[in-house]
Image (cartoon, rainbow, N blue to C red):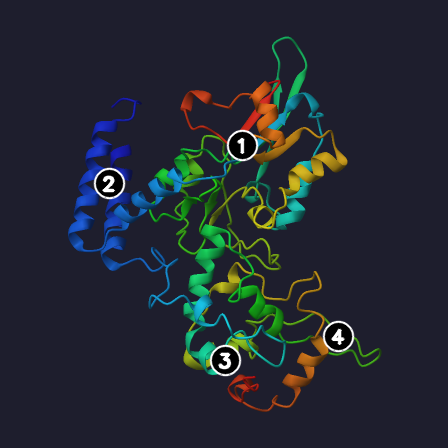
Amino acid sequence: MAWLGTGLAGLLMAILGVAGLPGANADEPVNGLDPLLEFESYPPAIKGKRCVVPVDIIRRRHMEFLDLQKDRAMVRGQRNQRFSLQQCVDCHAGPGPESVQDGEQGQPQRIDAPGQFCAGCHEYVGIRIDCFSCHAATPRKDGKGEADQRLSARAFSGRAGLTNPHFAGVSGD
Amino acid sequence: MTDAPDTRRRTLLKGGLAGCLAGSGFSLVQLAVAETESERADTLRRWGMLIDTGKCAEGCRACVDACTDEHNLTDSGEASAEPVWIREVRLSNPEGGVTALPLMCQHCADPPCVEVCPTGASFQRDDGVVLVNRHTCIGCRYCVIACPYQARSFVYETLENQLPRAPRGKGTAEGCTFCVHRLDQGGSPACVEACHSTAGGAMTFGDRNDPNSAIAVMMEQDSGVEIREDLGLDTAVRYRNL
């Protein structure tokens, strides 16, 4: 019966091939221009102040950047580049509740938790993101991304009443 | 029906499939084949591991524990669904005594898991590391069955608290990655570090293509053996004193 399994696998491949499996050749840029070169001269991100590229561009094209970066990291081993998903999480995961007693921050919230950075928009537009069923949704413990937790707390605090705080806009640069 | 694989029929099938896809205008198979060939041609590195089972104490779990910590593999709570990236194997010798050894993904040069994967999710990097692309893994578990070393396991339950360095999730196959996240930053696998710092130092890891690396020098003297060498998979992990 081994031939039947092989045949089924072949059929599946044929269907996927015709439909154009997303990501099959995705380690090449979508429009031929490498975003890493496109934004080479843009300064590095500062938590709460400046994103990895101008805000209007990251809002529109973050999925393209992340798609490219996932293949670079996984297939080529080029990690921690400008469009690393972990960088998003490190900067944008909401701070945990502040303790009344000692003013210490609690555990940061998951970035995909309801009302948090990713879910804020994706719930609004009705898109279910699957990134964080595998990827860590809270910042790295090894120092990176935790230093400016207070800054982030201030940046978020003024917009708590809005339906989607992230449309209100952190200034581009 | 015989047990021997009918290579003629498989070749025919592959050829037919490639032709069919080429005709469709989107050549997934051709692309994959072209990539594999060019990768192998200009591969500069080939990671390898040499394990001296003579230094492997029976009952030692240094490498297994290090792997568990590194990738946060403590999840399911159910023994049959427990992720196993490094398996402890005990061999009883005919002359008496027991040989213990760690068995993880052998990172074959010719990996069966890659060959059977219907989506190309099971793949081989340029440097020979065999990985699962969880973005395209559909959870069919062909690779789990195909691996002669039982090195692949499957995630049955929703996971939480994954580490940033080790993404893993429900519905995908997984296995030893040679700690690629460490390799890419110039480090060595967690198990090897643990073996040297807290155990007998049985594991040697390095670039087999670099003649000055420790592993290349050691393999020059005694290259060790492959487990199931008869399968002709050209494994990256070799064992001494087996």
Residues under numbered marks 3 and 2 in contact, where contact means CB atoms less than 8 Å apart: no
Percent of width and height locating residue B195: 70, 35
Which kind of residue does numbered mark 2 sit on?
Gly
- Going by the picture, which residue comes out furthest to the top? B95
- Going by the picture, which residue comes out furthest to the left? B23
- Going by the picture, which residue comes out furthest to the right? A101
Q: Residue at the location (50% across, 39% down)?
A: B45
Which kind of residue does numbered mark 1 sit on?
Arg
Secondary structure at numbered mark 4: loop
- Which residue carries the number 4 mark? A105
Spatial separation of the CA atoms under disc 1 and disc 2: 37 Å
Q: Earlier in the sequence, mark 4 or mark 3?
A: 3
Q: Nearer the viewer, residue A6 or B228?
A: B228
Subunit of mark 4? A
Spatial separation of the CA atoms under disc 1 and disc 3: 44 Å
Q: Which quarter shows the C terminus of chain A?
A: bottom right
Q: Earlier in the sequence, mark 2 or mark 4?
A: 2
Subunit of mark 3? A
- Which residue carries the number 1 mark? B208
Label 3 crowd (10 A; few <14 / some 14-19 / many >=20): some
- Which residue carries the number 3 mark? A54
Q: Are marks 1 and 4 on the same chain?
A: no
